Image: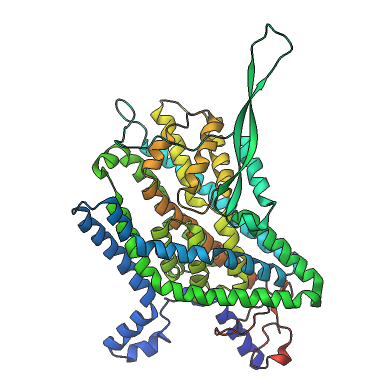
Amino acid sequence: MADKIDMEECKASNGEAHLDEPVLNGLDTHKKSGTLPLSERVKRIVKANLLVILTVAGVIIGVIIGMTVREVHLTRTQIVYIGFPGELLIRLLKMIIIPLVVCSLVSGAASIDPKALGKLGGWAMLFFLVTTLIASSIGVIMAFIITPGAVTGSKPIIAGLDDSVPEPKEVIDSFLDLIRNIFPSNLVSAAFQSYATAYKLVKINSTDPSSNITVEKVPIGTDQDGMNILGLVVFAIVFGVALRKLGDEGEILIKFFNSFNEATMVLVSWIMWYAPIGIMFLVAGKIVEMENVGELFASLGKYIACCIIGHAIHGALVLPAIYFIITRKNPYTFLWGIFTALATAFGTSSSSATLPLMMKCVEEKNGVSKHISRFILPIGATVNMDGAALFQCVAAVFIAQLNDTSLNFIQIITILVTATASSVGAAGIPAGGVLTLAIILEAIGLPTNDISLILAVDWIVDRTCTVLNVEGDAFGAGLLQHFVDRTSKDVGEALSEVRVGQTESAPEHSPLIEKRGVEARPNEKESVM
């Protein structure tokens, strides 16, 4: 009987039953809450969801402040000062990205058996690939239905628009850069720089004096600002597997990374309470910066609507439907649990900056095991870009329609495949997807100069892109938790315990976790019977 009770506790602690009920941590059961007065019930609900309420209030107040201050016609310097509290939030989040990603992946890979690691990684990559392909397809379909580029007369012209666009690269060079970044030559420089191909024109002198002088465009390697998260992710996973191979000799270093990881999550919990203030000023500052809003929406309104509607369909219908079909649990309860992270994604436009808050939300609100979330979410923030893939497909068809270019079936398939592949290499930073759009345009033979129009409204579209990206990562973690719970009987010893040191959170119990050293921690119950 005791064994049965322990197993039920294990399931509850790993999110087996929590998703079917509303996230009201202050209420024990519906029966109990029915006996409480209304004021007490409201107080408990507000207390349990205080951070979410504050975040929503921050977004709303930020919009109001931005619309009000716009009428004052502030100087550029004053606008910068208004956005300063929001800038602090982004800096705080970026500060802990590298230690969080590296430590969580090292400890996660070191605690998982290589067979289980491959299985979990395989399921995650399959989910990311399928959802990105679906998002790309939705983008193409929406662009053909709404036809945002079918304008009467000449192309839209935005006053004061900067015509500088990213330098187009050959498709092969873009994918070679992706592979090069997987294997960084310097781990220290990978923390703030990544590899990118540039081109140099070289004259080819011919021995024949009558022949013309030819010029060859030769690719050369350059370093560009921005973290090489992909290289750090790959190194951390491989390093974690190597530590596991060491056995007892690697135990001390694994405990170090576990402790570092837990300390970082404590910092994240502190930053979360500053997030509503930072988001409020981020939104207000961006609204104040807007220029020629009416002209912008008149010229590119259909394109903006096409992207946002596509993101809404994928995020509110497709991803929840996939989650419900596989888990038979309420996907919108799951979404409510990560609402703070989604609001932060909207405010910062950076999936990498949202990663720390996302880990905290899925673990505390949605019951995803630390072993799952801290292993798969950093990977998802790097390779899973549903929002970017959808917007790139819409932008490619939009530019084709602007240039009166009809796309054939082969070109459409090229857009889908290239958008899915290039989104993997898109940086998890604001406007990261625009930089890879040139790859798609080059692949189907469209001019890259029209990317300047995309840049003009990217600050709007990129926010919904980021929300969709992080939502896909969270659903991936939730589905992996479901997969782990379902297959626990078959692979009960596939995962070993993540040897976390002193933590304030309650001990986790997963059917896939093999508890070792129980004698040293008598307060923990074994989850594998």
Say which quadrant the N terminus sits in: bottom right
Relative to 50, residue 173 above or below: above
Q: Residue at x 28, y 42 (%)?
A: 297
Relative to 501, residue 444 above or below: above
Left or right placement of residue 2 versus residue 252 in this view: left
Percent x, y of residue 270: 45, 76
Count up the numbered dots. 0
Percent x, y of residue 197: 61, 39
Camera sees residue 498: no
Out of 192 and 352, give the one closest to the viewer. 192
Percent x, y of residue 222: 61, 42
Question: In which quadrant of the rendered view does residue 508 lie?
Answer: bottom right
Left or right placement of residue 233 versus residue 404 in this view: right
Question: In which quadrant of the rendered view does residue 483 lie?
Answer: bottom right
Q: Residue at x 73, y 84 (%)?
A: 516
Left or right placement of residue 109 versus residue 330 in this view: right
Q: Residue at x 35, y 84 (%)?
A: 44
Out of 334 and 251, give the one closest to the viewer. 251
